Amino acid sequence: QGGYESTAARLGMAQPRLVLMLLVVTLLCRVIGADAKVKKAAKIKEGFFDGEWSDVAWRGAKVAMALSPVAAIAYCFLSGVESKEEEDMKRHKKNDSGGGC
């Protein structure tokens, strides 16, 4: 029973800490949300091609960098196709080696 009481006592001591931590996290989330709301209201909406040419070029570069992994994956899938004859030849060559695995 001694171990059970010490565990219960620890849980009783941890509960105020948990409540305090949850309160701090909640307040922090509210402050961050309010700050984001103020920044969103103050932001002027502009189109993709509005602004100086260097801004437009930078936006285009960011879009290109963001889409480059998608383009690389598409290239791998589209360039990996071989004709049926080439696949059959590789399969027969692999099976004819007789070496085992």
Image: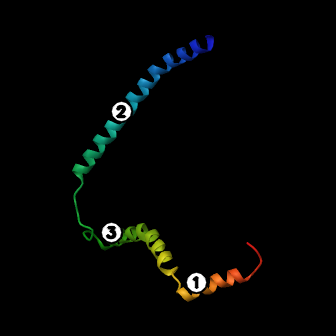
Which residue type does callout 1 highlight?
A: Glu
**Between residues 48 and 91, which one lies in front from this camera angle?**
91
> How many numbered markers are drawn?
3
User: Where is 74 relative to 86, above or below?
Assistant: above
Classify the position of the C terminus by image quarter.
Answer: bottom right
Which residue type does callout 3 highlight?
A: Asp
Residue to which mark 2 is pinned: 26
Residue appearing at x 58%, y 83% in the figure: 87
Residue to which mark 1 is pinned: 87
Return the mark for residue 55: 3
Horizontal and vertical percent position of residue 60: 35, 71
Q: Secondary structure at mark 1?
A: helix
Q: Mark 1 or mark 2: which comes first in sequence?
A: 2
User: Where is 19 relative to 60, above or below?
Assistant: above
Which residue type does callout 2 highlight?
A: Thr
Badge nearest the viewer, 1 or 2 = 1
Q: CA distance from mark 3 to mark 1?
A: 49 Å
